């Protein structure tokens, strides 16, 4: 899981960097342009594709994922988490075509979901000493850093108020 998260982040940075360097002929691209390019890659990949990936994990590989998380297998809440991931996955993929306030709404909703998820993982680490790979490590940092980065980028990019 950690390798997938790292590869995904590398793809976001490389894609955004190439878009900034090759897209417009500005000798000094603005920080707003850089933020928009990062969001344009990160929302579809980190929210979209990863959301779909997490949905598939919680459904097609439910038993293995439950074990990685330190959860009991067959927990019906895992299905609820799967569909929440699917919902954000679809929103993230829609960010390819829809921009402006849609990006802001997607980033805010995803941040609420992921940061609350991270809080639960932290509680599990402290209270239950659950340091299973799906509860701690790369997954935990992904749950914290990606939504905070999205919120910061949305605030900096100040997407236009065009209707989605």
Image: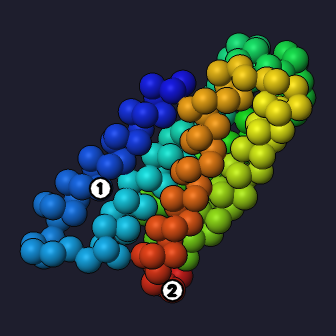
- Horizontal and vertical percent position of residue 14: 27, 47
For the point 37% across and 68% down, which residue is it?
Answer: 36
116 lies above or below 98:
above
Q: Is residue 3 left or right of residue 163?
A: left
Sequence-first disc among 1 and 2: 1
Residue 60 can be seen, yes or no: no
Q: Quadrant of the N terminus?
A: top right
Pick the residue in front: 71 or 99: 71
Residue linked to disc 1 = 16
Query: At numbered mark 1, what does the secondary structure look like: helix, strand or loop?
Result: helix
Q: Is residue 138 left or right of residue 71?
A: left
- Horizontal and vertical percent position of residue 161: 51, 86
Q: Which mark is residue 161?
A: 2
Pick the residue in front: 102 or 136: 136
| Callout 1 touching callout 2 (CB < 8 Å) | no
- Horizontal and vertical percent position of residue 67: 76, 15
Q: Quadrant of residue 125?
A: top right
Q: Is residue 42 left or right of residue 122?
A: left
Pick the residue in front: 29 or 161: 29
For the point 47% across and 80% down, which residue is it?
Answer: 158
Query: Between marks 1 and 2, how big is the CA–CA gap?
Result: 22 Å
Pick the residue in front: 135 or 108: 135
Query: At numbered mark 2, what does the secondary structure look like: helix, strand or loop?
Result: loop
Q: Residue furthest bottom?
A: 161
Q: Which mark is residue 98?
A: none
For the point 13% across and 60% down, which residue is it?
Answer: 22
Residue 69 can be seen, yes or no: yes
């Amino acid at each position: 899981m950690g390798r997938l998260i790292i590869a995904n982040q590398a793809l976001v940075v490389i894609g955004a960097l190439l878009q900034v360097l090759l897209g417009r002929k500005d000798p000094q691209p603005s920080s707003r342009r850089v933020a928009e390019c990062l969001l344009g890659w990160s929302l579809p990949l980190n929210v979209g594709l990863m959301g779909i990936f997490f949905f598939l994990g919680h459904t097609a590989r439910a038993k293995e994922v439950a074990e990685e998380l330190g959860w009991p297998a067959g927990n019906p809440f895992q299905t609820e988490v799967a569909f929440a991931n699917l919902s954000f996955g679809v929103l993230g993929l829609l960010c390819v075509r829809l921009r402006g306030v849609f990006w802001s709404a997607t980033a805010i909703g995803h941040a609420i979901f992921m940061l609350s998820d991270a809080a639960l993982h932290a509680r599990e680490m402290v209270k239950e000493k659950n340091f299973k790979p799906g509860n701690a490590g790369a997954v935990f940092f992904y749950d914290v850093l990606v939504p905070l980065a999205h919120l910061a980028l949305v605030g900096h990019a100040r997407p236009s108020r065009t209707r989605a």
